Amino acid sequence: MAEKMLQFVRLQQRQPDKRDAGERRADWEEVYRPFAQEAAATQASRCSQCGVPFCQVHCPLNNNIPDWLKLTAEGRLEEAYEIAAATNTFPEICGRVCPQDRLCEGNCVIEKGFDSVTIGAVEKYITDTAWERGWVKPPKPAMERGQSVGIIGAGPAGMAAAERLRVMGYQVTVYDRHDRAGGLMIYGIPNFKLEKDVVLRRQKQYEDGGIEFSLNVAVGRDVTLGELRNKHDAVLVATGVYKARDIANPGAELPGVVAALDYLIAANRKGLGDAVPEFEGGALNAEGRHVVVVGGGDTAMDCVRTAVRQGAASVTCLYRRDKANMPGSMREVKNAEEEGVIFEWLAAPEAFLGGTAVEAVRAQRMHLGLPDATGRQQVEPIAGALFDLKADLVIKALGFDPEDLPAAFGEPELGVTRWGTLKVDHRTMMTALPGVFAAGDIVRGASLVVWGIRDGRDAADQIHAYIQARAECPAIAAE
Ligand SMILES: Cc1cc2nc3c(=O)[nH]c(=O)nc-3n(C[C@H](O)[C@H](O)[C@H](O)COP(=O)(O)OP(=O)(O)OC[C@H]3O[C@@H](n4cnc5c(N)ncnc54)[C@H](O)[C@@H]3O)c2cc1C
Ligand code: SF4
C-alpha cells in the first residue's frame, strides 16, 4: 500500500491496461480493464497535493480531487467515495466518459514534466468499488416535502437534478420520450465506452429512492407543458439537442446515407436486447459493408468504432480539417486507429454517388487557409483534387442543434437564443415562463455529460430556492 503522496518523482503514470485491439473489435465490452486496488492506490499516490489544485478548477464539478486521491492512496476507499460523490452524481460515469485530457488531467501540474495523475481511472475505480461493496445507496430524504417537481428528460442533467431534489424531500417525476432513462448515456454513447448496466443501475436506485419515471411520454405529444406546470410546483426542461446537422450535397437522399444518432440508437438498442427492424433489415447494420463516416467529433468516433464491431468490410472517417484540429478526443481517435479505422484527413464530401442506393462518396481534398476572426484556420478546397471512396453505408455525424422547443411544446413564450437553445436567466436558470427551469445541452448546446450533471445539480438548487421563496411568501406565490 502506498503511504506517501508526491510519488510522481518516482512512479510513472500507468493508465489501466487497454484490451488488445483485435479482442476489442470482436466484442462490445469496455476498452479498459479495471484497476486493481494496488494499482489505483499507487497511481493516486502520484498526486502532488497542490495548494491550488488546477485539476479541481478545471473539473466542471470542481471535484475535490486531491482529497479523494490521498484517501485512495491510503486505502480509505469508503471515505474517498463519499468525497467523490459529494460533488458528482455519477462519478463512475465521468471516470469513463469525460475527456480528461481537456479537463482535470490536462490541467494537472505534474503534466508539465511528468505524465498527469490518472484522475478519471481512479474516480471510476473508487465508485465501481463503492457499487460492489454496497456503499451506493438510493437517494434518502431526511424529510418529505409536499411539493413536486416535473423533470422533462432523463439524461444526465435531468437525472442529476432529480436525485438532488429527491434528497431534499421533493416528490419528483421524470418524463422521457424514450423507454429507458439515461438520455444519450443510454442510447448515444456506445457500450464499449460506457456499459449500459452502469447507467441502468442508477435508474433502478432512483426508483428505489422514490423518484417516479414516466417513460414513453413525449412532452408536446402525449402531455403538454401547460399540464405539467399545473401538476407540479416547478418544471425542469432537460431535453438535450437532437436536430442532426445535415449535408446538402447531391445524392444525400440516397438509401444508405443515414444519420449518426439513428445508427447509434439502433446499435445500442440491439445491444440491450431490443427488436430493431431497421437493424435486422440491414439498413442500420454495417456488417460486410464499406462504411464512410463524415465528421470529426466524438459522435463520428463512436460511429466508426461501432461499425468496426459490427463487422464492416472497411471503415473510413472523412474529416475536412487535419488531425490536430479535430474536435473529437485524441484518446478516442487513437482507439479508433488501433481498431483499424482509416482516416482521410483534410477531405470533405462533394457528392454521394449511386443508382438505387449509395455506392461511393466523391470527396474533395482540402487545405487549411488563413485564420478567421475566431483565430481558427479556414478550410479551403484544392482545385481539381477529387477522389472517390467505395461506400455502401454513409453515416452523417456533423453535430446537433436544438429542436424547436417553443413549437414542439406549443409555448411561443419560451424564449430561445439565436442558436435555438433555451434562453434562461443564468443566475436562476429559469426560462421566460415562471417556474419553468432549463439545464443541460438544451441551454448550453451539444456539450458533455459532466456539464449536464453540473447544470442539473445547479438547477435543483435554484428550483429549491424558488419553491421555498413561494412557500414562505404568499405575495410571491400569488404572482
Ligand atoms: C454519440 C454521442 C457520444 C457522446 N459521447 C460523449 C462522451 O464520450 N463524453 C461526454 O462527456 N459526452 C458525450 N456526449 C455528449 C453527452 O452525451 C451530452 O452532452 C449529454 O448527454 C447531455 O445531457 P442532457 O441531459 O442535457 O441531454 P440528453 O442526454 O440528450 O438527454 C435528454 C433526454 O430528454 C429526452 N427528451 C427530449 N425531448 C423530449 C420530450 N419532448 N419529451 C420527453 N423527453 C424528451 C430525450 O429522450 C433524452 O432522454 C456524446 C453525445 C453523443 C451524441
Ligand atoms: S468529473 Fe470529469 S473532469 Fe471532473 S475529475 Fe472526474 S473525470 Fe475529471
Image: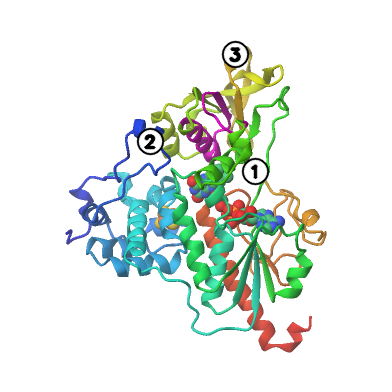
Q: Is residue 336 left or right of residue 9?
A: right
For the point 44% across and 32% down, the residue is 336
Disc 2 marks a residue whose amino acid type is Arg
From the top left corner, tell me how far across and down residue 395 is, in percent: 60, 31
Q: For the image shown, how many numbered marks are present on the structure?
A: 3
Q: Nearer the viewer, mark 2 or mark 3?
A: 2
Question: Is label 3 in a helix, a strand or a loop?
Answer: strand
* Viewport quadrant of the N terminus: bottom left
Q: Is mark 3 within 8 Å of ligand 1?
A: no
Q: Which mark is residue 24?
A: 2
Q: CA distance from mark 2 to mark 3?
A: 31 Å
Q: Which residue is mark 3?
A: 387
Q: Is mark 1 within 8 Å of ligand 1?
A: yes
Q: Is residue 435 magenta?
A: no
Q: Which mark is residue 400?
A: 1
Label whose residue precedes the other's in the sequence (2 or 3): 2
Q: Is mark 2 within 8 Å of ligand 1?
A: no
* Segment colored magenta: 283-308
Does the image show residue 448?
no
Q: Residues within 10 Å of mark 1 (few under 14, many from 20)?
A: some
Q: Is residue 330 left or right of residue 155?
A: left
Q: Is residue 442 left or right of residue 95?
A: right
Q: CA distance from mark 3 to mark 1?
A: 28 Å
The answer to whether residue 20 is above or below residue 206 is: above
Disc 1 marks a residue whose amino acid type is Phe
Task: Tell me if label 3 and label 1 are in contact, CB under 8 Å.
Answer: no
For the point 72% across and 22% down, the residue is 251
